[in-house]
Image: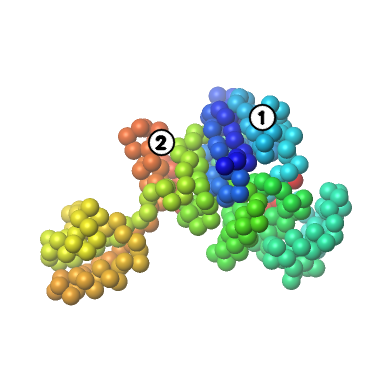
């Protein structure tokens, strides 16, 4: 297994503030890697160091097989990025904007056409950039980052600010790129998004790596809470149905470690026993709960992680 990117003890200090603290990341070739953390955790600073935009205070990084001794990495020409700064002319069309960038990068017009199709902008390619929705602007930024067929694509909160349809479009495009062999490193503060799109995840909190693991081993899979009467009989029945280890009891509820799709079967089984079910509730843990689960007992995370859905990384645009 080859790695597309590794960092070793990567650190950035701003005066007394340690924005990134001894980070060891390992992004494997061909995967979609989610760099997950609440606002202010150090994600953007890390990505900026990788891309040669912010000089690390300490540590090293190696990109696409370079020897890790030079910063910025000599391999940056093979890296595409969507990180900051609106970089498009509002009165030119998406196609004209891309063609201008392509000329500078010595990329063919055919590639521009191809890439507009890839990001699903071919139908609107001739419309002015100023008339694009946020999702379309974001996909044009992605198109610009892809012009030179990068081997590694770095995306800072690529779905930030998009509506659910825009998010789904962006996710689909990213998966398509990964299927074509491009390694993708994306940052996000949304646990649900990372679950939907990534193969592996690195979780960062207050500049430190909390965990790096396959997405399937992230934990926090969710639980079904059941309120039923009589509760003892319900517990006994459900213990037989899903295994006693998967049923936990609190004061008035039972909590089941099962898939959300089990709810109808559980309801039917209890009703068939003459047990009254007054509530079935699905609970999906947020980022903070997953942090706590991952760090339980070792004190690595203190204070509050941001709840889902209220974060913000500014700006669309690209560097390449
Ligand atoms: P967000 O999603 O909110 O941008 P993030 O995880 O990307 O969060 P960073 O933007 O990397 O976090 O910021 C990490 C910490 O470093 C924050 O406390 C931030 O205020 C600080 N920081 C970032 N850039 C600078 C700078 N140029 N000067 C001083 N402090 C900075």
The quarter of the picture where residue 298 lies is: top left
The foreground one among 300 and 172 is: 172
Residue at figure coordinates x 67%, y 46% from the top left: 152
The quarter of the picture where residue 51 lies is: top right
Residue at figure coordinates x 30%, y 71% from the top left: 264
Q: Is residue 315 visible?
A: no
Q: Is residue 65 visible?
A: yes
> Which x, y percent locates residue 9?
56, 28
Residue at figure coordinates x 16%, y 64% from the top left: 237
Structural crowding at the residue carrying mark 1, measured as other residues with C-alpha within 10 Å and reported as few (<14), some (14–19) or many (≥20): many
Regarding ligand 1, which quadrant of the image does it lie in? top right
Calculate the distance from the C-alpha at mark 1 to the C-alpha at mark 2: 30 Å
The foreground one among 184 and 141 is: 184
The foreground one among 69 and 293 is: 69
Structural crowding at the residue carrying mark 2, measured as other residues with C-alpha within 10 Å and reported as few (<14), some (14–19) or many (≥20): some
Q: Which residue is mark 1?
A: 68
Q: Hey, which residue is sitting farthest front in the picture?
A: 1
Q: Which residue is mark 2?
A: 301
Looking at the picture, the colour scheme in use is rainbow
């Amino acid at each position: 297994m080859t790695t597309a990117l590794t960092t070793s003890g990567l650190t950035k200090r701003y005066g007394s503030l340690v924005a990134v603290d001894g980070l060891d990341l390992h992004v494997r070739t061909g995967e979609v890697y989610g760099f997950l953390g609440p606002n202010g955790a150090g994600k953007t600073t890390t990505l900026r160091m990788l891309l040669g935009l912010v000089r690390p205070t300490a540590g090293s990084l190696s990109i696409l097989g370079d020897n890790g001794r030079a910063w910025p990495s000599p391999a940056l020409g093979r890296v595409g990025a969507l990180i900051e700064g609106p970089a498009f002319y509002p009165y030119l069309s998406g196609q004209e904007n891309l063609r201008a960038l392509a000329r500078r990068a010595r990329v063919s017009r055919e590639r521009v056409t191809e890439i507009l199709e890839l990001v699903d902008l071919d139908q609107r390619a001739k419309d002015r950039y100023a008339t694009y929705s946020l999702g379309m602007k974001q996909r044009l930024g992605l198109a610009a980052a892809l012009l030179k067929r990068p081997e590694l694509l770095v995306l800072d909160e690529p779905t930030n600010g998009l509506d659910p349809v825009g998010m789904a479009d962006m996710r689909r495009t990213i998966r398509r790129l990964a299927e074509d062999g491009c390694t993708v490193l994306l940052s996000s503060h949304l646990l649900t998004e990372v679950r939907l799109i990534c193969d592996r995840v690195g979780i960062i909190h207050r500049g430190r790596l909390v965990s790096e693991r396959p997405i399937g081993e992230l934990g926090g899979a969710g639980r079904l809470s059941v309120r039923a009467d009589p509760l003892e009989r319900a517990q006994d029945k459900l213990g037989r149905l899903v295994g006693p280890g998967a049923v936990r009891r609190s004061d008035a509820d039972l909590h089941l470690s099962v898939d959300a799709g089990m709810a109808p079967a559980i309801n039917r089984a209890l009703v068939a026993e003459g047990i009254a079910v007054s509530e079935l509730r699905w609970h999906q843990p947020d980022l903070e709960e997953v942090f706590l689960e991952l760090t339980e007992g070792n004190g690595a995370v203190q204070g509050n992680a941001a709840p889902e859905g209220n974060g913000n990384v500014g700006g669309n645009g690209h560097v390449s």
